[in-house]
Image: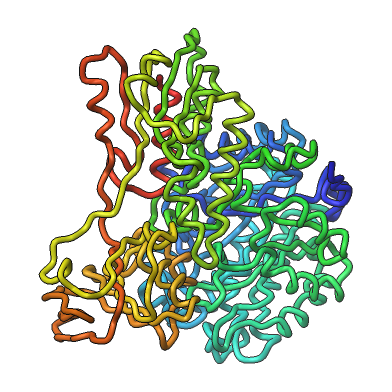
Amino acid sequence: MTALNHLFSPVKIGNMESSNRLLMSAMSINFGVNEKGHVNEQLTEYLAARAKGGAGMILVGGGAVHPAGLELPDLPKLWNDDCIPSLAKMVETIKAFGTKFGMQLMHGGRQSYHDNKVAPSPIPAPAVVKGIPRELTKEDIKEITASFGDSAKRCKDAGFDFVEIHAAHGYLANQFLSLNSNKRKDEYGGSFENRIRFLLELFRDIKDKTGDDFPVGIRMNGEDYIKDGWTLSDALKLAPILEKNGADYLHISAGVYGSTQLTIPSMYVEHGCFVHLAEAVKKIVSIPVITVGRIKSPVMADQILEQGKADIVSMGRALIADPELPNKARSGAFEDIRPCLGCCLGCIHAVLAREPGSCVVNPEVGREYLIKKQDNKKFQPKKVLIAGAGPGGMAAARKAAMLGHNVVLCEEKNETGGLMRLAAKPPGRSEIKDIIDFLEREIKKYKADLRLNTILDENLINEVNPDVVILATGSLPEMPIIKGLFQTKMELATVVDVLEQKAETGKKVIILGGGQAGLVLTDYLAEQGKEVAVLNRKRHFAEEMSSNDRFYLRERLKRDSVKLYKQVSVKGFCDDGVIFSSAGETIELKGFDTVIIAEKMNSVRDAKNLFKDRNIDVHVIGDAKTPRNLMLSQSEAEEIAQAI
């Protein structure tokens, strides 16, 4: 067993001591408040699951200190005393697990999703949020400064152990720090000393109202990764000043809306991508330094601490994916940890779409309070036959077996994973296979009967004699009817054929389809030195991907060998090319040798006919029901397994 002696050692922040060095970072999850912005049972139980799971410290994300700074609509509102009772109730629940509990204080500034945005200067955010903010007056600045202190005092009165000022990620405090967003000519703009003034003043206001013994940390960027943004050299100038002024810790992150390195990086980015920034800061201060950025392995977290690169490791999405990660890591059960894939779909993508946050691999996110309320009905174990060992079938098998049902999972092929195993083959996407490996281990652990190379037929049904059948038989590519497509001399294949290596491609390839499948296949072929033209009938590329994940993929496709066409209407294929219109312009491509279909998928559910004359409860899930993304298939699979 790998001993994590550093991660699970105590650490002091001011006069507060945490039992371990794992912090659940503040994440705007966009659920769990009522119409007044007071926290409720949904947010409490979501956080309680992570406290019970062993996180030493937890931060509530996105506590808004002022109405003008409410980043997203469904976040905690801290600007009135009436928020205190609900906060106190939440604090009592979380601290019962021995977790140190904090609130992150933030003002969204120009990155707020409403029409009354304010900022140091009337400059719109470079991405995501639209609208020109109103420039703050000095009176406004004093009001907002006081709102930070007042909100911190309310948090202290509610029983929180500490607070964190959000001065990173392009929000208001960061906007004052950065030349990109601060063009003021008064004492709050221009020189470095002037640009840090707002942060120092609000920090002092918090300390004046909460007392010097109440721990206050600061989350700040080591790099903005944007033109005229805050840099590491700026951070290294500011860090000792913050320490001198009484900061109890520094939490070093990076990125703003529109930056070239995203604040929440996807699977294309290396693990620990911001650790070097924290390491640089740690060398010049003596207060604890927290690092963050694509850290999902507890072993890696322990190594970061052992190597002296940080004092505390912050994990966000890894604890959304598996709230029990700390306890599992402490006991050495690393293979039991449900992995974050870095897809950004359920967490940040949903939240930026102003929807409740969720998780592709963990359907229980946001539903913890409902699960807790479920009646302990008398359990009746059933014989469950599941056809198809793709991610949906595997998730259903895992959950049903975990609940105590007798499960047989059959798969026609000689391996599990279905199309998800293929999805893990293109560059930068290997982590997708992590969920397949996890589900395989879980199926074995809970003793579901996995049968590979097994066709669902009358003989199997008679043998198993199931009470319930779940069809998770997936989908296959649809071949479109287009003039000349089946007469062309070019090789014709599907995205599945290519990734399964059942079809060879030439040097010049046309891909019909600009969704996720088409673009990741383009990357796969371009890495092999192929020239690729993508014909997308829609207005946008890879709409089913999260914006964060798609950003990195689109950056990878900025190469001479790749041409992307959208709003395509195909007029017809010829012997070595295609004629089409794109955004009103007629284009002819010649000299190509391969056409790959990567558009629509067709559900495969013919097996349902086997049960026409049988009195068996049959459920169709996942792509077999209708092609959909991994998040929906996992959620549906677990719900069906829970309901049977």
Q: Residue at x 58, y 73 (%)?
A: 255
Asked if residue 217 lies left or right of residue 349, the reply is right
Q: Position of residue 449 (x, y in %)?
A: 53, 25
Residue 590 vertical placement versus 624 (above, below): below
Residue 125 shows in this picture: no
Residue 2 shows in this picture: yes
The quarter of the rendered structure image containing the C terminus is top left
- Image label count: 0
Q: Residue at x 37, y 35 (%)?
A: 472
Residue 398 vertical placement versus 286 (above, below): above
Q: Position of residue 229 (x, y in %)?
A: 59, 84
* Foreground pick, 322 / 526: 526
The quarter of the rendered structure image containing the N terminus is top right
Q: How is the image coloured?
A: rainbow
* Foreground pick, 497 / 616: 497
Q: Position of residue 110 (x, y in %)?
A: 46, 72
Q: Residue 291: name its quadrant.
A: bottom right
Asked if residue 115 lies left or right of residue 143, the reply is left
* Foreground pick, 506 / 616: 506
Residue 366 vertical placement versus 546 (above, below): above
Asked if residue 460 lies left or right of residue 583, the reply is right
Q: Position of residue 140 (x, y in %)?
A: 51, 72
Asked if residue 122 lies left or right of residue 291, the reply is left
Q: Residue 309: name its quadrant.
A: bottom right
Q: Residue at x 60, y 41 (%)?
A: 438
Q: Residue at x 68, y 47 (%)?
A: 58
